[in-house]
Image: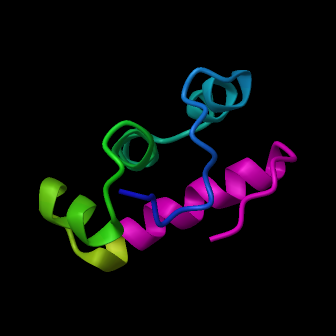
């Protein structure tokens, strides 16, 4: 299945290692759920027993950090 996210599937790239180093634990959850398991936001919310709004906050934090690292992400 195709990911709904603008992340390029490059789990081992230097960028994702660098991004992960700047992430909070919850942002890391989101990053792993998207990259490793190809989950949609609603599936992530269900998996971690949180609201979709919470998952959206995790995603927005990741996007902000990715852009600060000069990596263009579009969702």
What secondary structure is the magenta-colored segment mainly?
helix
Residue found at x 17% / y 54%: 48
Between 13 and 18, which is closer to the camera in this rendering?
13
Residue found at x 81% / y 56%: 72
Residue found at x 35% / y 79%: 53
Horizontal arrangement in the rendering, residue 60 relative to residue 51 (left or right): right
Residue 3 lies within the magenta run: no
Quadrant assignment, res 16: top right
- Where 9 sits versus 57, above or below? above
Position of residue 66 measured from the top left corner of the image (x, y, whole percent): 72, 49
Residue 73 lies within the magenta run: yes
Position of residue 40 measured from the top left corner of the image (x, y, whole percent): 33, 64
Quadrant assignment, res 56: bottom left
Q: Quadrant of the N terminus?
A: bottom left
Q: Which residues are magenta?
A: 55-75
- Where 53 sits versus 35, above or below? below
């Amino acid at each position: 299945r195709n990911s709904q996210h603008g992340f390029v599937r490059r789990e081992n790239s230097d960028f994702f290692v660098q991004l992960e180093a700047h992430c909070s634990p919850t942002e890391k959850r989101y990053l792993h759920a998207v990259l490793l398991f190809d989950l949609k936001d609603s599936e992530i919310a269900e998996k971690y027993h949180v609201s979709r709004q919470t998952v959206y906050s995790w995603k927005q934090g990741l996007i902000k950090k990715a852009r600060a690292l000069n990596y263009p992400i579009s969702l």
